[in-house]
Image (spheres, rainbow, N blue to C red):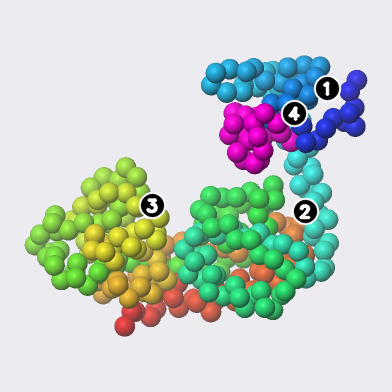
Amino acid sequence: MLGAQNLDWEEVKSFAVVADAGSVRRAAREMSVHHSTLIRRIDNLEHALGTRLFDRRPEGYVLTTAGEEFASVVRECGLRLNDIERHISGQDGDLSGTVTVTMAEPLAVHAFGPKMADFADANPGIEVRIIATTDLLDISRREADIAIRTNNNPPESLVGKRLFPYYETAYASRAYLDAHDFENAPEAARWIAFRDGDTKFPEWTKETPFSKVPVWGYFPNPALQQAAARGGLGLAMLPCFIGDKDPGLVRASDRKPTKARDMWLLTHSDLRRTARIRVFMAFAEKVLREAKHEFSGVAKPS
């Protein structure tokens, strides 16, 4: 029987990436290697195991039955290795190393970007990697160490705290508001849509003073919505910490902002005692709490 010591772990890793990608070329781009290198590694691994792991088809590499069984074993080993790595990392008391943080792009740009120099100066041994995305990266798989999420139902596997909600309201350029009669001719105005496939009058507009204004287009990124509203495209529903800071935008009504979602500061239970994790989480909480009035929309733009 073939033992684990006989396997080349680079070949096993390559197998796992190809299995997930379903294509050698996609996997090669992900791993930043030439596709011929992956083909050679897969061939070598199949030879070492004495079985065919993939069916080579025009549409891509498809796992055989043996390949599916091997992929299951490899994934299970990967999870166990991640558990061990987290446990070991959790015992690290040094203020050094890398901290990977995931958060939505607006938080990264507006809240953390301007403050990162303070953290770097105070903690020269810690390097921070910020992944600005709304994708829910898997901390259990070490895709990130810390997550700052705007989600009212965080995974039970993570630990941390709920801070406070952020608020949102409608914004537009002053010129756009002056040019439209929202009471008598709402159909001549536009909401900037941020959800694909919305009806002309979706639910999220009905609790606003502009429920008779139709939505238009599809602009999923808050920075894009902000820029489009500033340019006079229409009304944009934006978090107050974005809209209030933009001198080209004003609040479209005097109605109080509405609660959007809670903000959570989270990590894995195995990492919460790691010094560099604790230090960054304390820093992140300080950054967010100092800007609470901006998230709450307390201060209106001048």
Work out how far the residue at label 4 is from the one at label 2, CA to CA, in angstroms.
29 Å
Q: Which residue is mark 3?
A: 220
Q: Main secondary structure of the magenta part?
A: helix
Residue 134 spot, x, y in % from top left: 51, 53
What is the three-letter code of the residue carrying label 2? Arg
In primary-sequence order, the first of circles 1 and 4 is 4
- What stretch of residues is rendered in magenta? 13-37
Q: Nearer the viewer, mark 1 or mark 2?
A: 1
Residue 4 spot, x, y in % from top left: 87, 31
Instruction: Judge whether 142 appears above or below 29 on screen.
Output: below
What is the three-letter code of the residue carrying label 3? Pro
Q: Which mark is residue 41?
A: 4
Q: Which residue is mark 2?
A: 86
What is the three-letter code of the residue carrying label 1? Ala
- The 10 Å Cα crowd at callout 1, few under 14, some 14 to 19, many 20 or more, is few
Q: Which residue is mark 1?
A: 48
What residue is shown at x 78% (from left), y 25% (from top)? 45
Instruction: Judge whether 160 appears above or below 292 on screen.
Output: above
Q: Which mark is residue 92?
A: none
Work out how far the residue at label 1 is from the one at label 3, CA to CA, in angstroms.
48 Å
Seen from the viewer's position, the closer of residues 272 and 70 is 70
Left or right of 193 in this view: 162: right
Work out how far the residue at label 1 is from the one at label 2, CA to CA, in angstroms.
31 Å
Left or right of 143 in this view: 135: left
